[in-house]
């Protein structure tokens, strides 16, 4: 199977899959994707009932053009049952929490391949997004990021990770592990998601906006959200502006003209432009194209 490309989601909003009123309104919240949650938001006694809700809920949340994702339970009692309930044309990705084993990711992928075949879906229809949520996973980031062609992105789970580290989920404490995740993603040619801050803290939206601006500078391309207020801020900050697109296009044109003249670096708007700068500009244009910006 060929490696799956990241679809360009800036925002993915968690929705408790078993609560109908949240599912019904989800498509109005403006996210690029909605994560139908079978894990933290579903009580143990309701896990089986929640699985039955996945496909109908996926069709509802995607009615406005967004994509439906599903966060499964990693518990051995539930993981495969959750996957079997979630593979469908209407579900674009499985979010795997608390990952620590690349072998488990490959096992999940093999089962997904069989389910896609059984349901007449093309192999590779269903992507995987990995959540790193413990200090034990940090030494395994490269193995996890490169574990399977279905893996398109990885994200640090701020609250669970901080609990295992015995630290407060603050921007200062979360910067290093987020950078480690981002760099592992880039080495594996997958996309880094998240931001150096607590996903649970959205009370100060101006501070949150600054955190997302910093995350963009760090190379993050999207994030999970637990509140619609976060969605609006992240979408705005991670959408390339017309000025950024124009600058990237001009930069690339100047560099290509320099190459044609036998130069490996050129000056553009008072800055020296070489290949690494051009690659960043090309990524910005790819993101803009994916978003229609």
Image: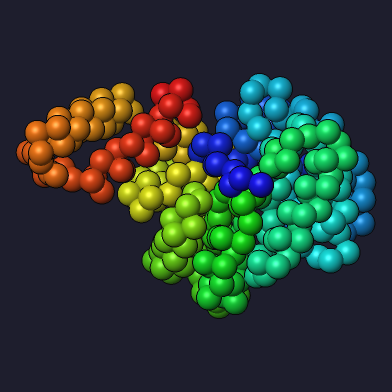
Q: Is residue 59 above or below residue 231?
A: above
- Residue for point 83% across, 47% down: 114
Report the residue at 56% width, 55% height from top.
Answer: 154
Count the labels in the image. 0
The one of 210 and 220 positioned closer to us in this rendering: 220
Residue at left offset 61%, top offset 45%: 2
In the image: residue 214, left or right of residue 155: left
Closer to the camera, 103 or 64? 103
Image position, residue 259 (x, y; %): 15, 36
- Left or right: residue 279 versus residue 36 is left
At which x and y percent is residue 127?
Answer: 66, 45
Rendering coords of residue 269 (x, y %): 10, 34
- For this rendering, which residue is in front, 192 or 195? 192
**Quarter in which the C terminus is drawn:** top left
In the figure, 59 relative to 16: above or below?
above
Residue at 63% over, 56% down: 148
Report which quarter residue 253 is drawn in. top left
On the question of residue 199 being in view, the answer is no
């Amino acid at each position: 199977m060929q490696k799956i490309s990241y679809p360009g989601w800036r925002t993915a909003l968690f929705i408790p899959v078993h609560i109908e009123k949240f599912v019904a309104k989800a498509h109005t919240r403006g996210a690029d994707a909605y994560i139908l949650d079978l894990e933290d938001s579903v009580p143990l006694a309701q896990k089986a009932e929640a699985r039955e809700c996945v496909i109908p809920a996926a069709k509802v949340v995607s009615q406005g053009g967004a994509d439906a994702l599903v966060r499964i339970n990693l518990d051995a009692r539930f993981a495969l049952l959750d996957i079997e309930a979630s593979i469908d044309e209407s579900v674009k990705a499985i979010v795997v929490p608390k990952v620590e084993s690349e072998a488990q990711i490959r096992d999940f992928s093999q089962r997904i391949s069989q389910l896609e075949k059984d349901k007449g879906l093309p192999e590779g229809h269903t992507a995987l997004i990995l959540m790193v949520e413990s200090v034990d996973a940090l030494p395994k980031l490269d193995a996890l990021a490169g574990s399977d062609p279905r893996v398109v992105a990885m994200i640090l789970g701020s609250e669970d990770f901080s609990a295992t580290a015995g630290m407060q989920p603050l921007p200062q404490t979360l910067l290093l592990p987020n950078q480690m995740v981002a760099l592992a993603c880039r080495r594996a040619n997958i996309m880094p998601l998240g931001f150096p801050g607590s996903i649970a803290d959205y009370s100060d939206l101006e501070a949150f906006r600054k955190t997302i601006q910093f995350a963009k500078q760090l190379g993050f391309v999207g994030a999970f959200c637990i509140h619609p207020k976060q969605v609006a801020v992240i979408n705005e900050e991670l959408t390339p502006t017309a000025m950024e697109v124009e600058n990237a296009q001009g930069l690339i044109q100047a560099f290509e003209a320099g190459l044609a003249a036998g130069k490996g670096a050129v000056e553009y708007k008072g800055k020296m432009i070489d290949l690494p700068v051009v690659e960043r500009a090309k990524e910005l244009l790819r993101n803009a194209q994916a978003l229609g910006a």
